[in-house]
Amino acid sequence: MIGWYAHHHGLGHVSRLQAVAAHLDVPVTGLSSLPPPQGWTGPWVRLARDDAAALEPSGPTDPTANGTLHWVPRHDPGLAARTAQVADWVARARPALVVVDVSVEVALTVRLSGVPVVVVTLPGRRTDRPHRLVHDLADALLAPWPEGAHSSDWPQSWTGKLAAVGGISRFDGRTPAEGSAGGPGRRPRVLVVWGGGGRQTSSAQVEAARAATPGWEWVECSPASPSRDLWADLARADVVVTHGGQNAVAEVAAARRPAVVVAQPRPFDEQVATATAVDRLGLAVGLPAWPTDPGAWPGLLARARQIGGSRWQHWSSGHGAATAARVLEALVQELSTPPVGSAAEPVTVP
């Protein structure tokens, strides 16, 4: 059995867990501050929240432990409770390994309990002290992007244990629509996709882009106003304008739609790194921020259509989730095998 920790910020971490778990032949227990997602049938450990200190007027005290970790505020009861929950579950369940997506502190708790850790690694500037710690201690690094998209400046000690499986999407395995989505007498359509992690782009900026492209129909979807059938809406879009979150990009890639990937502010410039990568690889238009000049949009949409959607096959093979599952199952076998000589007589320490 394996455990899988999913961070509560945004929707992508839990979505990735669901996508991979559907292909696993070993039982999975989810651990998160979020409730189990719709359709989840396996065990789920609902963890205490650890951000009460952030809501205090004075704010958290020493949340980074002098720069060694990311979030360990002093005297936060939720932090103590969730750490105890994770350690208690590990001691009782004795998992073969735990996937951590993402938390330096949870990964450290699990590894201090003697359990192998697979860290889901994300794009951006990840060479700060806490990230170096978690990447060093990980038994394996699972990357939901294709080989060559990121990590070119990483040390060999990290790249040597990196499994870059490509985009992981709930739409893996589906057959994308071919060619243009347009039809006779219909204006070309822009589908704007927002995620659950927050956005800096305002509604006024979107309206200005709409006004600057009168020949286009603009449609938006977000967690507050979700699509009833995102796969169908992606297929009907002539260009998708999406934030740079890993899951959103993977879903656009799975649908093979022309796209403009616009980074939203995130820690460690995660979305900027993804937008830069897809632009550099020639898969889509990638922007570090929403354009300040609405007049840029006609050219951006035209460029996205010129690139097309077929190049997304280099990002999303259509079986990233299944590949990740095979990687984890192989690790379960490898890390569950006692090392040579482990049957020797135990050493007694006086």
Image: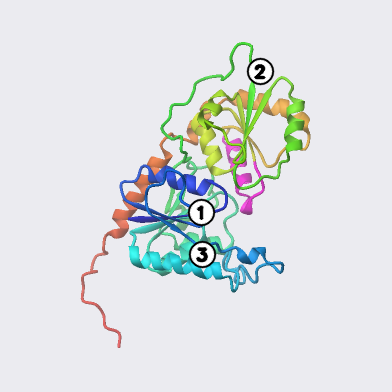
Q: Please name the colour scheme applied to the rendered image.
A: rainbow
Report crowding for label 1: few under 14, some 14 to 19, many 20 or more residues within 10 A (C-alpha).
some
Query: Of the residues shown, which amino acid type is indicated by label 1?
Result: Leu
Asked if the stretch drawn in magenta spans residue 276, the answer is yes
Q: Residue furthest top?
A: 184
Q: Earlier in the sequence, mark 2 or mark 3?
A: 3
- SS label for mark 3: helix
Tell whether 147 sits left or right of 197.
Answer: left
Q: Which residues are magenta?
A: 263-281
Which residue, given by chain and number where applicable, does mark 1 sit on? 34
What residue is drawn where x is 77% and y is 38%?
292
- Label 3 – label 1 distance at C-alpha: 17 Å
Q: Quadrant of the N terminus?
A: bottom left
Asked if the stretch drawn in magenta spans residue 64, the answer is no
Q: Which mark is residue 105?
A: 3
Q: Residue 195, can we see it?
A: yes
Which residue, given by chain and number where applicable, does mark 2 sit on? 187
Could you tell me how many numbered marks the image carries? 3
Q: Position of residue 20 (x, y in %)?
A: 41, 44
Up-down: is 215 above or below 276?
above
